[in-house]
Image (cartoon, grey):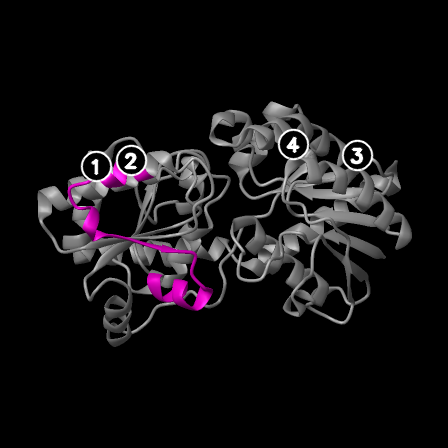
Amino acid sequence: MNIAVNTRLLLKNKLEGIGWFSYETLRYIVNSHPEHNFYFIFDRKYDPSFIFADNVKPIVAGPATRHPFLWYFWLKFVIPKVLKKINADIFLSTDGFVSLNTKVPQVVVIHDINFYHNPEQLPFWVRKFYNKYFPKFANKAKHIGTVSEYSKMDMSNVFKINPEKISVCYNGSNNIYKPISETEKVKVRQKFSNGYEYFHFVGALNPRKNIPGLLKSFDLFKEKTKLPHKLIIVGSAMHLTGEIDKVYKEMKYFKDVIFTGRLNIEDLHLIYAASTALVYIPFFEGFGIPLVEAMYSEIPIISGNTTSLPEVVGEAALICDPNDYEDVAKHMESLALDLKLRQKLIEKGKIQREKFSWEKSGQKLWKCVEKAIETINNA
């Protein structure tokens, strides 16, 4: 088969949740199926490291899709033209976008529909585009993948889609995430936190990640315990970060917060492995890859109780209401002081993490392609 693939989010040194899902699952699929031709469609110059195998043929089809108006143009005009040119049998898109202007069968991965529940958290034109077109994309696709049972049922209910049309393809964790020695931990702390122990968060700095709540919780933890711990926040600012700035400036212990910006995966792996705990309390999450990365790094987790998060962490985390800052602070205190509790959560994480691997994710995504083909053949 000629399989066209939307790879516009494969951006060197800029991979985040959907980008990592795309990278890992596509790398698995193309190497597992050398019998097929894969046409990776980039919207700008690509890095050669994304051409995972000899059966991958890159195509650059601009313009670069940096704005909803360009998304619309790319999907309506550019993608149909490319699909026709390469005589595509199927179009696989891992970022939620499909073309409404082609008869080529399509498989789409829609990670979550936060834009439906919390439109005010997105820039105006982005939320307009998402809420207008994602229901159409979901109905147009022959089969849909998503990253949690929560997202599956959410999408089925909101978009009025038969749940049998949706398959769950959990996220995984890169092999680099693993424990390090105590000697290495000391070196990491010297590099990133002036030698002090620390909690950490990983994710894009946008409203749904609840960074203000994290800062308030950390301030309470510091005020009560007077422990020397720092808070490291890893991620780049996206939009609507004014509340983060406001809360940060109002903190008593703001000097103990370290914003690193985006880090390369080598440094990020070290941040995880030397951390006292991952504190991850977003308001809405389709999955939450940092949770699995923490399990593989063998550190404890403090997790929110919203959306998909309880499904992902199972019993491998201390779970709390993301709006209950005192409870979050209490959990931080517990993990800073109670070594037995830390080890108990780490052991449960070793069990829970077995559910999640990129190999399993790639296998599930390929099943989505096969189900789409089956639907076509039975039509």
Q: Is residue 261 left or right of residue 140?
A: left
Type of the residue with mark 4: Pro
Q: Taking the image as drawn, is residue 173 in sight? A: yes
Secondary structure category for the residue under label 1: helix
Q: Mark 4 and 1 residues: CB-CB less than 8 Å, in contact?
A: no
In this view, the residue in front, 91 or 211, is 211
Type of the residue with mark 1: Glu
Q: Mark 2 and 3 residues: CB-CB less than 8 Å, in contact?
A: no
Q: Please tell me which residue is depicted at 60% across the width and 24% down the height of the picture.
A: 158
In this rendering, the label closer to the viewer, 4 or 2 = 2
In this view, the residue in front, 259 or 283, is 259
Secondary structure category for the residue under label 4: helix
Q: Please tell me which residue is depicted at 14% across the width and 46% down the height of the picture.
A: 222
Q: Is residue 260 left or right of residue 223?
A: right
**What numbered label is drawn on residue 100?**
3
Type of the residue with mark 3: Leu
In this rendering, the label closer to the viewer, 2 or 3 = 2
Q: Taking the image as drawn, is residue 330 in sight? A: no
Q: Mark 1 and 2 residues: CB-CB less than 8 Å, in contact?
A: yes
Bounds of the magenta span?
Answer: 245-271
Type of the residue with mark 2: Lys
Quote the CA–CA distance across marks 2 and 3: 42 Å
Dot 1 or dot 3: first in sequence order is: 3
**Residue 86, position in %: x, y?**
88, 55
Q: Is residue 358 left or right of residue 186?
A: right
**What numbered label is drawn on residue 163?**
4
Q: Which residue is mark 1?
A: 250
Q: Which residue is mark 2?
A: 246
**Residue 16, position in %: x, y?**
51, 52
